[in-house]
Image (cartoon, coloured by chain):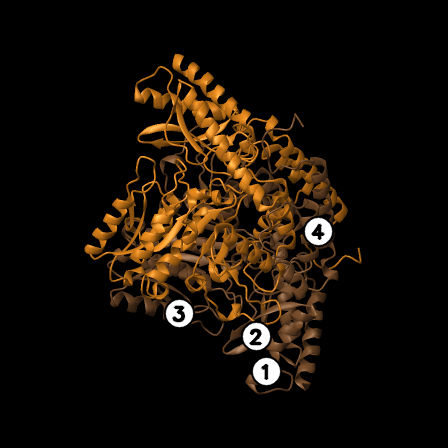
Chain colours: A orange, B brown
Amino acid sequence: MPDEPLEETLDPRDWEEMRTLGRRMVDDMVEYLRSVRDRPVWRPIPEETANRFREPLPRRPASAGDVYEAFRRDILPYPTGNIHPRFWGWVMGNGTVTAMFSEMLAAGVNLNQGGGAQAGSLVESAVIAWCTEMFGFPASASGLLVSGGSMANLVGLTVARNSRAGFDVRSEGVAASPHAMRFYASSEVHSSVRKALELLGVGSNALRLVPARTDYTIDLEKLKEMIREDRSRGLAPLCVIGCAGTVNTGATDPLDALADLCSAEGLWFHVDGAFGALAALSPGLRHIVKGLEKADSLAFDMHKWMYLPYEVGCTLVRDADAHRRSFALTPDYLEHTTRGIGGSDIWFSDYGVQLSRGFRALKVWMSIKEHGIEKFGRLIQQNVDQARYLEKLVRATPELELLAPVPLNIVCFRYVGRLSDEAAIDTLNRELLLRLHEGGMAAPSYTILDGKYALRVCNTNHRSRREDFDLLVREVLRLGQILSRA
Amino acid sequence: MPDEPLEETLDPRDWEEMRTLGRRMVDDMVEYLRSVRDRPVWRPIPEETANRFREPLPRRPASAGDVYEAFRRDILPYPTGNIHPRFWGWVMGNGTVTAMFSEMLAAGVNLNQGGGAQAGSLVESAVIAWCTEMFGFPASASGLLVSGGSMANLVGLTVARNSRAGFDVRSEGVAASPHAMRFYASSEVHSSVRKALELLGVGSNALRLVPARTDYTIDLEKLKEMIREDRSRGLAPLCVIGCAGTVNTGATDPLDALADLCSAEGLWFHVDGAFGALAALSPGLRHIVKGLEKADSLAFDMHKWMYLPYEVGCTLVRDADAHRRSFALTPDYLEHTTRGIGGSDIWFSDYGVQLSRGFRALKVWMSIKEHGIEKFGRLIQQNVDQARYLEKLVRATPELELLAPVPLNIVCFRYVGRLSDEAAIDTLNRELLLRLHEGGMAAPSYTILDGKYALRVCNTNHRSRREDFDLLVREVLRLGQILSRA
């Protein structure tokens, strides 16, 4: 073939065939999502399927069509299940069809969101500006889209550490601190905050856990006491982390009071609002997270309560300079220019850990434009209303016990029936949850509250309907009765 | 509409319409990539287009079709340009059609790669096993797919810090170290290593930069001297970072010798192989990175020299236990089970920063299965051959000056013509690069070598052909002559 170039490429030999395959994928995936309600929430992976993944490194090629068939056969039927209307485990979003398409478009243009003069810089800038508007942050605040809540907290806490330590932490390291740094959060704070402080080298001992009150919010008086005590011991209080929607029960700390306290004490105020921050989008819920807008840094996720597919979280930082000073590094080979591809003021890589960055901003931009932010607010309200509906069902059902208040979208409860032995109740509910998963009917997750094993329904699901919660309660009762007799 | 459910959802009202839109996107994107060679590498964004991104937070909905039109009009024509056959800037991959589709599939199943009993766990496990095979790591090694090289280095260096400090860094923080930690790397090491050490709280002063030799590799004798000196000063040498393919010139440190030194000195051996590590895939290049397989941790990217779209990098860690001990945290609400959705031994969230994780493993899995790993090896060799071809062109052209050896896929050169004044040559080449970008003909990037401004061609491009490098040289000469006369 004389016209064939000398070189190989990963581009398809037959573009038309590839186009046809892509169209088939669209058809299949749209149908897959349209019919998700008809399938079980989850099912275990057969051993035979699992074994097929244990092949050695493929050396020779296969057709794209065959590879896609392997995906359809071995992957598509065995997802985590969070796409399903009756998945309420951990904190996961469903994803949407538009955002699924956006991910294909993003991978196609494959631009590098480190920054520079390309359209993606404008898209992410727009999204960050929208986020400041959504949460009442000043327009001068900076922000960064990140992989999720863990990274969003890490970014916020890095800026806290670097800008409040009082010396050049980036060069000298935390060991140069004359006084040991201290961070404060309620005992209900998410584990990613601890992980961030471990990474940052301040150590998890620097995280002072303030006892939570019976409603699972931080005890403000205890917090003040601990700060006072630490100062008197020569330690260096540096930052308070407020929770907007705790992972266990959806509790929100008194953010307004925390903001005032931080301001008075000269402490950085970081809010972990992974899902709870989004309550700000609903006029009926906004009061719960009042004070959020005073945070120095705010972490939240769009792949949770904005229903987008993985991965997308965000950190907002009130003081854009402090944010940039915590991360910017410009070696020769990254020198910014005023013209050409590097000719831009926008360098997201100066605001976080990643240098090369993907175009996750696109799905956010397209989704907010398509649905309008008001619809997200209505859906969030809908999820809270559904949680309250479930709470009512639980309260009205003598066999069930509500284990925590329902301030937002999380309902923690258990089956008790006629049992009174705590250990037996725990054992029963543990088994009950596994049977729920295995039956494919519904997927709550679990937690421990005051030593009690709880079924935990966390509703960040745009596909759920009230009838789904009726069904959950019926199924819990059915299984509870079976297990009580066992 | 009595059959309409009470609740709203983000699902399409008209699934058929959405399917049609998705098919159009496939058609457009396949055509966009098929015809990429016919377009300029890059073009500036018109002010009118940029202004359209400055809209306030959209409150009301728009049709998905209209939003897609905005994407087509305002984003698609203005990418970074790394999809193009003549983009050789920084270190970026092109992406591929299959991987673009994979991203859509991944967002559709939207499974959470934190772990658990779902197919994605098996996919990422397979990919990690393949990576250990690719680089000659033991099968017992652990690994994690991450957002890219910066995160891959951060993960590796976290394990280095935590497992070699000699005390519980996670709890106590780095300040508890009796002796200041020291990390070593050549002065050519990538800035992400410095960024990682800043984040980890050891501080960039802990990074001892060892002078590079004239071939831009680390000076081994100087390294030994510095370690000895630091020990005698009571400091704590902890880790050596070897470079497999430096960002400036593609130099690779003597990894085998570094591995032996680390072993003798009891130091952690981390290799930053962002793109260079992939040379291991070609039998003709493998010798360059010999010693890589002895590293304690290895960071590399698949969105660079495996040509995949953003984002995907990887860290391998020889000691899987040390890896897990650096990151695992299991609060009540994440307690692992033996059955149900949480019933799995595979929890990637125990091996890195992220808890929720997207399905980036899918595009790697599908791409390796489709093309076979041997093809990636051939393409990498092809890129090196092309770089050598360009080197020959530069050497054969009196107006051009080669500024560094070409050990791999990077060629640094400049236009000199009849100029002899160094400042004038720098100024000319700076302008020349911007004109190259603005002309849309080719996109190298730039760096500074021994004080000299260099045009830097980094070839990780599966679409490039030899004729593209001919064209580059012709264009550089044309612009150089114009600018010399100015």
Task: Identify which amino acid the numbered label 4 is placed on.
Answer: Glu
The image's mark for residue B454 is: 2
Chain-order first, disc 1 or disc 2:
1
Residue at point 66%, 72% (across, down): B436
Circle 3 Cα neighbour tier, 10 Å, few/some/many (<14 / 14–19 / ≥20):
many
Task: Identify which amino acid the numbered label 2 is placed on.
Answer: Ala
Circles 4 and 3 on the same chain: yes
The one nearer the camera, B214 or B67, is B67
Q: In this rendering, does residue B200 appear at all?
A: no
> Does residue A372 appear to the left or right of B293 in the view shown?
right
- In this rendering, the label closer to the viewer, 4 or 2: 4
Q: Indicate the position of residue B403 as horizontal and vertical percent values.
A: 56, 76
- In this rendering, the label closer to the viewer, 4 or 3: 4
Circle 1 Cα neighbour tier, 10 Å, few/some/many (<14 / 14–19 / ≥20):
many
Q: Indicate the position of residue B220 as horizontal and vertical percent values.
A: 40, 68
Tell me the SS state at disc 3. strand
Chain-order first, disc 1 or disc 3:
3
Label 4 with label 2: CB-CB less than 8 Å: no
Q: Indicate the position of residue B72 as horizontal and vertical percent values.
A: 70, 54
Circle 2 Cα neighbour tier, 10 Å, few/some/many (<14 / 14–19 / ≥20):
many
According to the picture, the residue beneath numbered tag 1 turns out to be B425
According to the picture, the residue beneath numbered tag 3 turns out to be B210
Q: Chain of mark 1?
A: B
Residue at point 55%, 77% (across, down): B453
The one nearer the camera, B172 or B368, is B172
Task: Identify which amino acid the numbered label 3 is placed on.
Answer: Val
According to the picture, the residue beneath numbered tag 4 turns out to be B69
Circle 4 Cα neighbour tier, 10 Å, few/some/many (<14 / 14–19 / ≥20):
few
Chain-order first, disc 4 or disc 2:
4
Circles 4 and 2 on the same chain: yes
